[in-house]
Image (cartoon, rainbow, N blue to C red):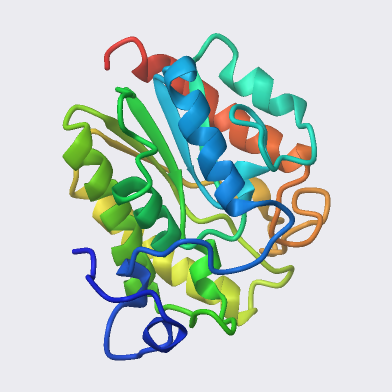
């Protein structure tokens, strides 16, 4: 359940509540205008008329597509993955589940459209502590992601959810952030197994070496995919979407 708590630094660092459930506008300053991207989405969503919506953070945002506001790179794999589909990319750099919940519930980004599929890649930024917000636990992050799903289902009861396991981060498998993400994904996988019209996609085996290391060829900064990393995502995602679009 979304928490009706004021967006303040004090509240976003509280330990007695799940801060991943507090709807928030921009928390971190990034390489683009968060509010400008919101305006671009509102201006373009009806023209796009998406059958597929992508929602997430910078990993989704910087892949490409429309709206292209705030995208600074071009990845050919985006066009290859979504060729022949009407897709709206509402990934936002630095977004946590809090930001996604705000955009869904208060940002009007889903009004007037009727997508058949949503691809959700959320939660990696909830593993960071900054001045604006604390790191969340695995249980809190999973609850935040589940609430993003619930909000989509509330608006589009027949929508099919493609839930991405949070991508691996950091070079070494023993890094604390990697361990936190693994714990979160375990909960998300269990959640997915209990819900219909939901496809869970885990790319860890394809992104990591046999020793569990994350190569720079896949994620140059050990977080954001390179074109090679995006190709892995696209190769897994495209056949799923094509099959689903036959029936949903």
| Tag count | 0
Residue appearing at x 54%, y 80% in the figure: 132
The quadrant in which residue 222 appears is: bottom right
- From this view, report whether residue 238 is shown above or below residue 185: above
Q: Percent x, y for residue 163? A: 39, 44
Residue appearing at x 49%, y 18% in the figure: 48
Q: Is residue 61 left or right of residue 13?
A: right
Q: Is residue 154 left or right of residue 136?
A: left
Of the 4 image quadrants, the one containing the C terminus is top left
Residue appearing at x 16%, y 32% in the figure: 157
- From this view, report whether residue 215 is shown above or below residue 244: below
Of the 4 image quadrants, the one containing the N terminus is bottom left
Q: Nearer the viewer, residue 118 or 189?
A: 118
Q: Nearer the viewer, residue 235 or 74?
A: 74
Q: Percent x, y for residue 101? A: 35, 55
Q: Nearer the viewer, residue 204 or 52?
A: 52
* Residue 48 visible (yes or no): yes
Q: Percent x, y for residue 87? A: 50, 23
Q: Is residue 51 left or right of residue 231?
A: left
The quadrant in which residue 212 appears is: bottom right
- From this view, report whether residue 244 is shown above or below residue 69: above
- From this view, report whether residue 98 is shown above or below residue 76: below
Q: Percent x, y for residue 228? A: 77, 38
Q: Nearer the viewer, residue 161 or 180?
A: 161
* Residue 196 visible (yes or no): no
């Amino acid at each position: 359940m979304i928490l009706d708590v004021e967006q303040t630094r004090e509240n976003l660092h509280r330990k007695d509540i799940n801060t991943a459930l507090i709807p928030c506008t921009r928390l971190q300053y990034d390489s683009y205008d968060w509010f400008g991207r919101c305006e671009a989405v509102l201006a373009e969503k009806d023209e796009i008329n998406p059958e597929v919506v992508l929602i997430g953070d910078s990993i989704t945002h910087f892949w490409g597509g429309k709206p292209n506001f705030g995208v600074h790179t071009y990845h050919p794999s985006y066009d290859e993955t979504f060729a022949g589909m009407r897709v709206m990319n509402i990934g936002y750099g630095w977004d946590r589940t809090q930001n996604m919940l705000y955009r869904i519930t208060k940002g009007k980004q889903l009004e007037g459209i009727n997508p058949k599929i949503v691809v959700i890649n959320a939660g990696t930024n909830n593993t960071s502590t900054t001045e604006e917000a604390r790191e969340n636990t695995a249980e809190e992050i999973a609850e935040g992601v589940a609430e993003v799903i619930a909000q989509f289902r509330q608006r589009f009861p027949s929508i099919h959810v493609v839930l991405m396991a949070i991508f691996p981060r950091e070079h070494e498998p023993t890094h604390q952030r990697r361990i936190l993400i693994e714990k979160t994904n375990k909960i998300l996988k269990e959640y997915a197994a209990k819900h219909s019209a939901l496809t869970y996609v885990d790319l860890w085996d394809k992104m990591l070496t046999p020793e569990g290391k994350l190569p720079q060829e896949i994620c140059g900064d050990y977080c954001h995919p390179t074109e090679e990393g995006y190709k892995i995502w696209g190769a897994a995602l495209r056949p799923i979407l094509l099959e689903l679009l036959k029936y949903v």
